[in-house]
Image (cartoon, rainbow, N blue to C red):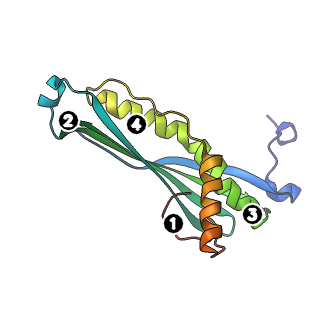
Amino acid sequence: MSEENNNAVPAEANNGPAFTVEKIYVKDVSFESPNSPTIFSENVQPDLQLNLNQKVQRLSDEAFEVVLGVTLTCKAGDKTAYVAEVEQAGVFGLIGLEPQAIDVLLGTHCPNILFPYVRSMVSDLIQAGGFPPFYLQPINFEGLYAETLRQRQQQADGTSLADSEPAGNA
């Protein structure tokens, strides 16, 4: 294929705003089943606790790492059946965008891109651990982002995800 037929035009060539997915990767993954194999014979209703977090780190003027972390803990009575932890990351290019647009993309679009990878990894880990499949339900990242904005306004610090420390929920 000649370059003339290639529809992909680098952002620099058209000098317009651009959003790119540079890389998607697993940053950290862990699965523990501390009470196996006896936990398999427990006949109690499992209690699931989900913890979700997002970290953003500025890598350069135009690149950001976004990490979507999920920890799922399943207890059977007073025993831990399993703990599955996944940190799915991506490097995203954000070129020629206003700070507010960058903030919105980092808080909503980037985690929406990462979520299917997290969902698959968590499900695979749990099933490989000998437990019934578990499927994370869709998450409204736009709603979480709106809540984060409300919290920021209450704190009146005016920081954006792009300029914040790489920790916490977004």
Three-letter code for the amino acid on which mark 1 is drawn: Pro
| SS at mark 4 in the image | helix
Q: CA distance from mark 2 to mark 1?
A: 35 Å
Question: Residue 17: in sight, yes or no?
Answer: yes
Tell me where residue 150 appears, x and y as whole percent. Answer: 64, 61
Q: Label 1, on which residue?
A: 166
Three-letter code for the amino acid on which mark 4 is drawn: Val
Residue 100 numbered mark, or none: 3
Q: Nearer the viewer, mark 3 or mark 4?
A: 3
Q: CA distance from mark 1 to mark 3?
A: 18 Å
Looking at this view, is 115 or 47 the one in front? 47
Q: Nearer the viewer, mark 2 or mark 3?
A: 2
Q: Where is 101 relative to 108, above or below?
A: below
Q: Nearer the viewer, mark 2 or mark 1?
A: 2
Q: Where is 85 relative to 103, above or below?
A: above
| SS at mark 3 in the image | helix
Compare marks 3 and 4 and give the one earlier in the sequence: 3
Tell me where residue 94 appears, x and y as whole percent. Answer: 71, 59
Looking at this view, is 15 or 115 the one in front? 115
Viewed as shown, does residue 5 lie left or right of 54? right
Three-letter code for the amino acid on which mark 2 is drawn: Gly
Q: Residue furthest left?
A: 38
- Quarter of the image with the N terminus is top right
Q: Residue at x 73, y 52 (%)?
A: 19
Compare marks 4 and 2 and give the one earlier in the sequence: 2
Compare marks 2 and 1 and give the one earlier in the sequence: 2
User: Looking at the image, do the residues carrying marks 4 and 2 touch, with CB atoms under 8 Å apart?
Assistant: no
Viewed as shown, does residue 27 lie left or right of 3? left
Q: Label 4, on which residue?
A: 122
